[in-house]
Image: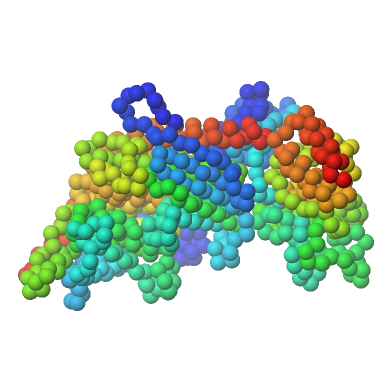
């Protein structure tokens, strides 16, 4: 019965849950989905990471290559982020050339990376359709002497977190894809612990200052949690 | 639109606009704000492609054309932002199964192109007489390396200001001046975010005033 | 009430103190106004107008036509599909027109309408959820001026405001032009105007005069018509 109700009246279904301050997947409004992180899962890449956030899985690989620098920035390298939304992942994605959503996401990742200063191999990954994943990764910079490889230095470690606005008033942290389609607005905040790296709220229902502040505070909190998880994972690899 | 009181408070650069100068579209506007110039055209409500048809509301299509070359990822993310802003502002449920198309052409690129684009699109929609729930205005704020804030940096044409470490574009709805949209580049602290928000909110009032004045000029002539 | 009259409003403006009719305690809201809760908001930029006892609406400058039931429009036949013609009336969707909606037409006696023909017709069905339908007969089954418009002439598009201005009883444009030159004219509320003068030269002059009158007062129109008549007389 509940399933039929969910299909026929998804908004009403959610409202019933939200009245009791709980979500259909048993989370509280401000709770993230369980996160699993695995680092170095692709052996052929210079650096890689796999993140599972509930039912959303994103894998990221970093490849370093020697290349001619861009003419505008002769002393710096450059990063080409590429987000692929394969048709196997979700019925929302179609095969073929990168969709508009994939292009927008690539640009978002590029913006985040650009903010981190030059040549850091920090790659922040995000998947809006099934949202919020951030990975930061050790990469190896390729030097002219291929024998000698240095660990890449990261200037900071950005973590993103997403909030969805339901019915213009309720804030849902870390929305699932279903919640996101029902939501009237999405706010994504990327922080590095001290500063805001990127704030993205593309339209949707207008928010008050206090609602925005809640999103930002939650993002900082998330940063601490995620950093701890990342440290733990890195330690376990070293062993 | 300058505050012109000679105080050190950052003020908005001058804005000028031309409404309805294109004959083919249903509404058009060319907005100059500081160094940035964007031309916007609005068609609709008109026929929509079957694949994009939405049963209970109008489809808003946004095309952002760069000055040279083909549209890139950057332009796609601008298109998405403008689409999402106006999807909330336009009364889409009034025209189900139709399309409202917003075409933006970048004429001059300068800091704050995005904000100029949103404002130009809003003016073009007003010119077309499309029903909207509320007006929207975009204001961009820059954070300098010394931590000071600026609304209208003086940049050499075509040259990025190296002094700017971050920029925040806010879009406000006229009703209650709530935040419709934020997009930012660069790193900044939460305090800086708050002061930018405050500054932009104040500045948005003058943008709304400018919209009103432009429309009054046009309407007093035509009606 | 005077405070509201002819004031310029923008989308999202709250409109207070609307006058209610004394008998029914109701206010009639026309185009450009909407209610949200207990308040009335404008949703189009334009001039707020009021008519006794309780009717309010917003006059907007617009080019795109949105079909309204009962309005007379000029359409162009684009397709013939079985018993139905598709007619482009400038709205978001093409209107349909049954071949029986002509004066004197029966299943046997089909009207002579071809693709590309221009029609003067009336909107029978027009709402946002349905395809608009036009007819070329009135309630009594007579054509009353509607039907296919043939034999040359010139069709052009103007803004919706100009069309309303031409048709309003206070505008003297048509009367004044008619005194100077004999001509035929069809004005559709969808912003399309068809004129035909005695010669091509006159037709063009008439079309220009109509377009030019958009921002003119009655006095200016008189002067313009006089000048036009002089010029046309000089040509021929």
Q: Is residue A50 left or right of residue C226?
A: left
Q: Quadrant of residue C24?
A: top right
Q: Position of residue C197 (x, y in %)?
A: 86, 48
Q: Residue at x 74, y 38 (%)?
A: C213
Name, please, the residue furthest toward the bottom: A44
Q: Quadrant of residue B140?
A: top left
Q: Position of residue B222 (x, y in %)?
A: 66, 36
Q: Residue at x 36, y 63 (%)?
A: A130
Q: Is residue B24 left or right of residue B103?
A: right
Query: What is the quadrant of the C terminus of chain B in the image?
Result: top right
Q: Is residue C133 left or right of residue B55?
A: right
The one of A43 and A30 positioned closer to us in this rendering? A43
Q: Is residue C207 left or right of residue B77?
A: right
Q: Is residue A99 visible?
A: yes
Q: Position of residue A132 (x, y in %)?
A: 30, 59
- Image vertical order of residue B111 relative to residue C27, above or below: below
The one of B57 and A169 positioned closer to us in this rendering? B57
- The count of marks equals 0
Query: What is the quadrant of the N terminus of chain B in the image?
Result: top left
Q: Residue at x 58, y 32 (%)?
A: B216
Q: Is residue A12 visible?
A: no
- Image vertical order of residue A152 relative to residue C181, above or below: below
The one of B215 and C228 positioned closer to us in this rendering? C228
Q: Position of residue B61 (x, y in %)?
A: 52, 56
Q: Residue at x 57, y 62 (%)?
A: B53
Q: Quadrant of residue C227?
A: top right
Q: How is the image coloured?
A: rainbow
């Amino acid at each position: 019965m509940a399933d039929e109700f969910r299909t026929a009246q998804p908004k009403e279904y959610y409202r019933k849950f939200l009245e009791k301050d709980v979500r259909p997947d048993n989370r509280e409004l401000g709770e993230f989905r369980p996160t699993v992180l695995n680092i170095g899962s692709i052996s052929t890449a210079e650096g890689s990471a796999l993140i599972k956030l509930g039912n959303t899985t994103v894998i990221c690989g970093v490849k370093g290559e020697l290349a001619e620098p861009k003419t505008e920035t002769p002393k710096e390298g450059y990063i080409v982020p590429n987000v692929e939304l394969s048709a196997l992942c979700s019925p929302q994605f179609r095969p073929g050339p990168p969709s508009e959503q994939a292009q927008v996401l690539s640009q978002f990742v590029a913006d985040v990376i650009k903010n981190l200063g030059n040549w850091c191999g920090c790659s922040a990954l995000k998947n809006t359709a099934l949202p919020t994943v951030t990975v930061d990764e050790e990469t190896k910079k390729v030097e002219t002497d291929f024998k000698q490889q240095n660990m890449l230095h990261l200037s900071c470690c950005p973590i993103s977190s997403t909030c969805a606005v339901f019915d213009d008033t309720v804030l849902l942290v870390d929305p699932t894809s279903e919640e996101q389609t029902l939501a009237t607005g999405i706010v994504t905040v990327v922080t590095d612990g001290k500063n805001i790296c990127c704030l993205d709220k593309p339209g949707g229902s207008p928010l008050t200052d206090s609602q925005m502040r809640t999103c930002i505070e939650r993002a900082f909190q998330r940063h601490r949690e995620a950093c701890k998880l990342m440290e733990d994972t890195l330690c376990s690899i070293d062993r | 639109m300058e505050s012109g009181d000679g105080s050190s408070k950052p003020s908005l650069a001058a804005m000028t606009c031309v409404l309805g100068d294109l004959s083919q579209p249903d509404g058009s506007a060319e907005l100059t704000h500081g160094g940035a110039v964007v031309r916007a055209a609005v068609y609709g409500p008109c026929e929509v492609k079957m694949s994009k048809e939405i049963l209970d509301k109008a489809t808003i299509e946004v095309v952002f054309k760069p000055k040279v070359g083909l549209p890139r990822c950057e332009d796609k993310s601008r298109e998405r932002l403008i689409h999402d802003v106006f999807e909330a502002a336009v009364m889409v449920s009034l025209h189900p199964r139709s399309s409202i198309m917003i075409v933006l052409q970048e004429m001059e690129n300068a800091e704050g192109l995005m904000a100029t684009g949103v404002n130009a699109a809003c003016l073009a929609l007003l010119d077309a007489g499309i029903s909207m729930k509320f007006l929207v205005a975009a204001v961009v704020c820059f954070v300098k390396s010394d931590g000071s804030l600026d609304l209208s940096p003086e940049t050499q044409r075509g040259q990025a200001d190296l002094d700017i470490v971050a920029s925040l574009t806010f879009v406000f709805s006229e009703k209650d001046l709530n935040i419709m949209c934020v997009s930012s580049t660069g790193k900044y602290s939460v305090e800086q975010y708050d002061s930018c928000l405050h500054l932009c909110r104040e500045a948005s009032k003058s943008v709304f005033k400018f919209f009103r004045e432009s429309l009054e000029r046009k309407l007093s002539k035509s009606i | 009430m005077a405070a509201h009259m002819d004031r310029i409003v923008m989308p999202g403006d709250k409109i207070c103190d609307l006058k209610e009719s004394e008998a029914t305690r109701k206010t009639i809201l026309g185009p450009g106004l909407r209610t949200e809760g207990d308040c009335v908001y404008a949703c189009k930029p334009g001039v707020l107008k009021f008519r006794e006892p309780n009717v309010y609406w917003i006059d907007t400058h617009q080019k795109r036509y949105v079909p309204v039931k009962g309005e007379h429009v000029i359409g162009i036949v684009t397709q013939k599909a079985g018993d139905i013609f598709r007619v482009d009336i400038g709205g978001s969707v093409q209107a349909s027109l049954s071949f029986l909606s002509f004066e004197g037409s029966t299943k046997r006696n089909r009207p002579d309408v071809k693709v590309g023909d221009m029609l003067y017709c009336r909107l029978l069905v027009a709402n946002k959820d349905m395809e608009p339908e036009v007819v070329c007969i009135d309630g009594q089954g007579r054509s009353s001026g509607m039907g296919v418009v043939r034999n040359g002439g010139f069709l052009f598009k103007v803004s919706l405001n100009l069309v309303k201005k031409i048709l309003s009883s206070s505008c003297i444009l048509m009367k004044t032009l008619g005194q100077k030159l004999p001509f035929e004219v069809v004005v559709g509320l969808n912003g399309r105007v068809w004129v035909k003068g005695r010669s091509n030269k006159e037709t063009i002059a008439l079309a220009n005069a109509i377009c030019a009158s958009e921002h003119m007062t009655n006095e200016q129109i008189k002067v313009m018509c006089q000048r036009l008549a002089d010029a046309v007389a000089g040509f021929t």
